[in-house]
Image (spheres, helix red, strand yellow):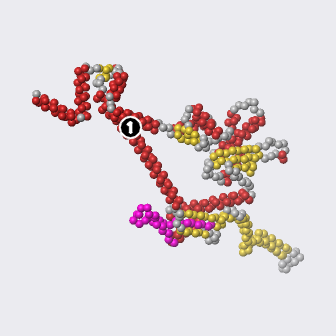
Amino acid sequence: MDWRRYWEEIKRVYDGLDRRKRLLIGGSALGTILILVLFISLSTRTHYAALFTGLDPADAGAVVEALKADGVNYKLDNGGATILVPREKVYDLRLKLAAQGIPQTGTIGYEIFDQNNIGSTDFVQKINYHRALEGELARTISTLNEVKAARVHLVIPEKRLFERDQKEATASVTLKLKPGHRLTSTQVQSIANLVASSVEGLRPENVTIIDTKGNILSRPRDVNSAVALSDNQMELKKKVEQYYTDRLTQLLENVVGKGKVAVQVAAELNFDRVERTVEKYDPDNMVVISQEQEVQENPDSGASAGGRSQHTITNYEANKTIEKIVQDVGNVKRLTVAVMVDGKYLAPPNGGKGAEPKYVPRSETELEQLREAVKTAIGFSEQRGDEVQVVNLPFDRTQLEQEERALQQMERRLFWERMLKRLAYLLLILGLGFGLYKVVTSFKTILIPHMQPVLSLEPGGEAMTLELPPDIKNNVRLQQTIATLTREKPDDAAKLLKAWLVEEVNE
């Protein structure tokens, strides 16, 4: 196909157009190109997702170097602590970097011995062992859900010849907790036991645990010490109070509704360790434990004088019962329960829009029923001096209403964002189709009528161009002129056609 001929013909026709038609063709073509570019950019835009977050500078640098070596595009966020990569490559890259030991989180474990250092001394081997042990312990502690990072330092003294000269091993653990998390005393003690069990000669009480804020988390391990007893007692007291609070809240919310009840329980526990031994005697039930009978005969006395005597000695012992009573520590000594219940809210009459619901307090009968239900749930005992108070007060719903309005606004915003995004794609597709239609129509209505008739055949994939004879060209041009005149000036064309018909009739 002779493209040069076509291009010269298009250029000739375009030069013969007026300014308005040129602007129409150029604007349509430019709009179509812009729409195509925008559509392609939106459809091929890369979406990034977090590969790692909260990285140290050293680990972040190692990850970035690995990504550069693999030619993976990445972005840094949060001061370099967060690394973003294309969303479809996140999981593959995590597995690949994990196989390379990246990130190492700044700790070295037993892999330090994977390197064959033949010339290392015993001192170096010992130091490497301490480093590996510290790193492995830090990794194990970091697996806890509440712990973000951990550092472990061990002090293992050398063996001494005499026992009196031997020093004890010590350890210190620094924990970086996740935001909003805390460790219970049981978990802290578990960490101390873990470290002590991993090091020979280390006792749990010689392990000091702190957090990154400098707070000491570890406590003396001796359960008989005053501090340990106080911590255990407070923890047990909190567990008992939380147990009753959860139980009462669940019970009352099924009646008054979720978020309309507040429960506070104060438990007084008895931590006195009492052992009693009781011995009871029953004098009415005597038991024969032994009986001795003595018979004596006098040979000098005759038979008639009764020369025989008999003595019986019986030993009795009262019935005795021995009871040993050991009273458990932590028994409930007294319970005090305070319950606040919200009232009822009636809808405004006639369904007034924007009007606030009317608050209606609960009746005394209903409060008494709730009070009896609370007493039954906690096992109320007057002998212990338990107290239960159930009051009806209107709750402050300002914060709750603000949160609900904020949530509704967020939902509406997300909804409209989704709708606008879909509408933008729809308008983009419609604009693309309309632009293509305008371009095709413009070329069809402007260029084609002015182009020379060319017959293009492609037999065997080769283009062939056939020129028309001059007389046929003149006829074609005349037809095109008439068609153009008819399209642009239909009234004049109609008058001209009518005049031709009249002349033909007259002839």
Residue occupying the point 18% across, 34% down: 495
Q: Which secondary structure lies at badge 1?
A: helix
Residue reaching furthest bottom? 305
From this viewpoint, is residue 125 visible?
yes
Q: Position of residue 393 (x, y in %)?
A: 53, 67
Q: In this orientation, does residue 379 appear?
A: no
Residue 308 x %, y %: 84, 76
Q: Residue furthest front?
A: 19
Give above or below for 365 relative to 233: below
Q: Quadrant of residue 236?
A: bottom right
Relative horizontal placement of residue 422, taking residue 453 as reference (left or right): right
Q: Judge by depth and name the residue closer to the eye, 222 or 336.
A: 336
Is residue 362 a member of the stretch shown in magenta?
Answer: yes
Q: Which residue is mark 1?
A: 432
Residue drawn at x 41%, y 66% is 349
Question: Image check: 434 left or right of 179?
Answer: left
Q: How many marks?
A: 1
Q: Quadrant of the N terminus?
A: top left
Q: Is residue 400 left or right of residue 448?
A: right
**Amino acid at circle 1:** Leu
Magenta-drawn segment: 335-364
Residue 439: image x %, image y %? 35, 34
- Residue, x 25% and y 28% (percent of image)? 480
Of 345 and 443, nearer the camera is 443
Does residue 145 lie above or below 488 as drawn?
A: below
Name which residue lies at 72% across and 39% down: 131
